[in-house]
Amino acid sequence: MLEQLLIFTRGGLILWTCKELGKALKGSPIDTLIRSCLLEERSGEVSFNYEAYTLKWTFHNDLGLVFVAVYQRILHLLYVDDLLSMVKESFSEIYDPKRMSYDDFDETFRQLRMEAEARGEELRKVKQVGKVVSSVKKQGQVSKSGLDGGNKSGGGGSKKDVGDGDKDKDKVGSFMTNGNHKMEDDDSDKTNGKENTADNVVLDPSKLMKLRSKGVRGRGGVRKTDSIGNKSSKVAAAEPPKKATKKNRVWDDAAPKQVKLDFTDSVGENGNGNHDHVDIAAADQGESMMDKEEVFSSDDESEDDDDEPRSDEKKPEAKKKGWFSSVFQSITGKANLERTDLKPALKALKERLMTKNVAEEIAEKLCESVEASLEGKKLASFTRISSTVQVLCFGAMENALIRILTPRRSIDIMRDVHAAKEQRRPYVVVFVGVNGVGKSTNLAKVAYWLQQHKVSVMMAACDTFRSGAVEQLRTHARRLQIPIFEKGYEKDPAVVAKEAIQEATRNGSDVVLVDTAGRMQDNEPLMRALSKLINLNKPDLVLFVGEALVGNDAVDQLSKFNQKLSDLSNSGTTRLIDGILLTKFDTIDDKVGAALSMVYISGAPVMFVGCGQSYTDLKKLNVKAIVKTLLK
């Protein structure tokens, strides 16, 4: 049963809704579709599921209209696509941009709906008949095979009942098979320069063994190297004895002394270490790159303008047309753009994105979304199709990338820190991610940037799993003169983080930066521990730290992190990743596609970009520069 069908403009103005289907929808499926699918360049997908509903849509790109149908997810309505296309065609004929009411379309929709339901019923019957026919064929094949098996078994038991004609057939069959063997053997004998008679066709096993022992291979070719190979294999079988490894010399017959590797200070009961004789090395490193505005010269822009899409790509061969019609059509253009016109340009765009390290799945979805936004668009007269299509695809892809990478919410951390300070509580940031991406190092960079803005920071060493993690964070805290809360190893990280927040509240710290253990997205115990830490402490910001070097793996990492945090959440409100910190951005040259893949799959903005090894090497993501690099 269809729940609702409505027509609205791309600007959000609702033109018509079906009054007969005027049921109150639970929740806000239309708003969610616009926010989570259409605005995020996912319009190329077939459908969208929201709670108990499934939504399907189509566009009229020339008029800027959107047609959406809503129905129950458990129902598989076969006529929805046909109904949308018929409604689109009928409504576009009466559409007027100055007109606001379309009450006269109710009767037209009623007729279209009845026609679409009738077609859907016919399709359902045809599918049922097809299933019955296929099942009957399968049963017939089974019964036939059973009869054949019975005949074979019966024939084996009554050899005497076989007639003379069957015997003759058997003789003919045996003669044909013998003839075939004879022909094959004749071919093999000719290769040896000999001719065999019919008596020599069948080989004696004893003779065959003698031939093998002499070194005959295949069809009579003598293999001289076999004897040598056998000797070498025997020699190889007898392996030489292993030499004894040389032992290290011990002077004065004394055993080597055990060296203590932990040179850090002892930890007090409150989690704070002894910070006497602190080696300050980061006080004079200057201003963080977060507070510097990047300036791009006009030379870069001119180079980017020169790199506009070219028409060098060969198009797939289409149907042959007359000389005059093809020339005239290339000059005047078509009435509307079709998918065949867009495919060559979109294919080139997809390959370009993939060379920039964008995940293949993301590049394909983006091209599908651009195709859906351009299909049916009218072209101006006397314009060449190839050049116009490439310019349109390039512009649509550029706008889509800017829309995806631009944050949809405020990412001003300093404002949020001051807001939490007014509430007399610390602002808590949790750093999560896979192993070896640089969580601890970039946590120290964020702490240095916060220090530059006169914000008091405390570090919480909640990586109680990896050896040396506490000492690493303690070293950063000493260099930056920042207090650190630690409880050693083999402790519950959720409890350590909770105690660190309580300590920061007592000491008046403004921000608590929580370092967690690196974990792969498939590690169930560690993902469960991370979910417990987030649900227990309810941090203000959950930052996913990811490498800019990853390609397709970025999609798997972020999607599974969010999925595990959602599945393992015990509270009613699910907490997912809020932002992304991209590391090692200075090592990728123009392969900046990981930023696009991560933002597209998670919907979280890139808040920090790590671009070096010093504390000042932390900056914001320049969206325009990333988009130009992707399309360069």
Image (cartoon, grey):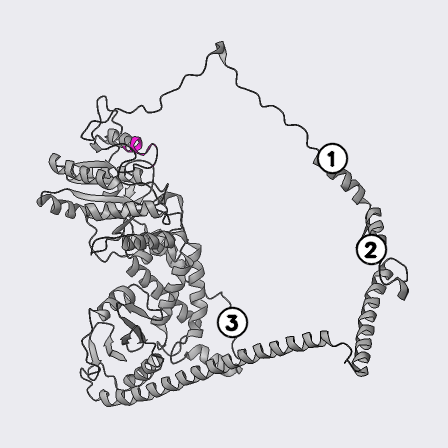
Q: What residue is rendered at 76% in x and 42% in y?
A: 229
Q: What residue is rendered at 24% in x and 34% in y?
A: 286
Nearer the observer, disc 1 or disc 3?
1
Residue 308 visible in the current orientation = no
340 or 436, which lies in front? 436
Nearer the observer, disc 1 or disc 2?
2
The region drawn magenta spans 465-473
N-term-proximal mark, 2 vs 3: 2
Mark 3: amino acid: Pro
Question: What residue is disc 3 on?
Answer: 316
Q: Are marks 1 and 2 in contact (CB under 8 Å)?
A: no
- Neighbor class of circle 1 (other Cα within 10 Å; few <14, some 14-19, many 20+) is few
Measure how far apart labels 1 and 3 are at the Cα level.
Answer: 61 Å
Percent across and percent down for residue 401 are 33, 60
Question: What residue is disc 2 on?
Answer: 205
Percent across and percent down for residue 189 are 86, 61
430 or 409, which lies in front? 430
Which part of the image, by quadrant, shows the N terminus?
bottom left
Which part of the image, by quadrant, shows the C terminus?
bottom left
N-term-proximal mark, 1 vs 2: 2
Q: Secondary structure at mark 2?
A: helix
75 or 163, which lies in front? 163
- Neighbor class of circle 2 (other Cα within 10 Å; few <14, some 14-19, many 20+) is few
Percent across and percent down for residue 305 are 37, 59
Question: What residue is disc 1 on?
Answer: 235
Q: What residue is rendered at 19% in x and 37% in y?
A: 500
502 or 324, which lies in front? 502
